[in-house]
Image (cartoon, rainbow, N blue to C red):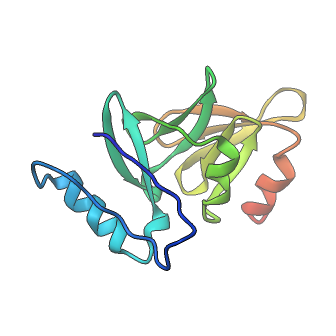
Amino acid sequence: MKVNLFVSRDIDEPHADIHTNELTDNVTKAISILESEESNDMLAVKKGSDITLLELQDVFMFRVENKQVKVYTQGNEYLIKKPLYQIEEGLNQSFVRISKTTIVNLKKIERVAPSLKGMMFIELKNGLKDNISRKYLPGFKEALDL
């Protein structure tokens, strides 16, 4: 699917035009999201040439790998074009940064344990593992009310 975005200061209200040869479930879902006032709880991601709309509550982790931001869910891995800092700005309090390259969903944590050199180790419910760096540990503890 090809997506074009036009930014103009000459319009009063944002609007979207969708051109398609078939009304698919994804197109219907996109229309619903665009018309919704609460569209910030959805995230457009890519897997191959497919664009998928994810609910933020289904996201386990955002992680930078090989200069790309990957989005992890229960059993899938997607790519997103935005840099990590822009993604972080649009997230709710369920998400917290645990390192320079990783943001996790607090609701998807399986366990947290001590690690090396003052860091903490985190394991998510989908089996993903990462370290919470010392720099981000105070913010992580505050987000968990510890």
Name the one closer to the observer, 17 or 87: 17
The quadrant in which residue 113 appears is: top right
Please name the residue shown 17% across and 50% down the image: 20
Residue farthest to the left?
22
Mark count: 0
Please name the residue shown 36% across and 45% down the image: 3
Q: Is residue 58 left or right of residue 30?
A: right
Q: Is residue 69 left or right of residue 3?
A: right
Is residue 76 visible to the viewer in this orientation of the structure?
Answer: no
Q: Which quarter of the rendering shows the N terminus?
A: top left
Is residue 118 visible to the viewer in this orientation of the structure?
Answer: yes
Q: Position of residue 127 (x, y in %)?
A: 49, 33
Residue farthest to the front?
10
Q: Position of residue 55 (x, y in %)?
A: 40, 57
Q: Position of residue 95 (x, y in %)?
A: 63, 56
Q: Position of residue 74 (x, y in %)?
A: 40, 41
Name the one closer to the observer, 20 or 131: 20
Please name the residue shown 46% across and 38% down the image: 126
Q: Which quarter of the rendering shows the C terminus?
A: bottom right
Please name the residue shown 21% across and 53% down the image: 19
Name the one closer to the observer, 61 or 50: 50
Name the one closer to the observer, 79 or 123: 79
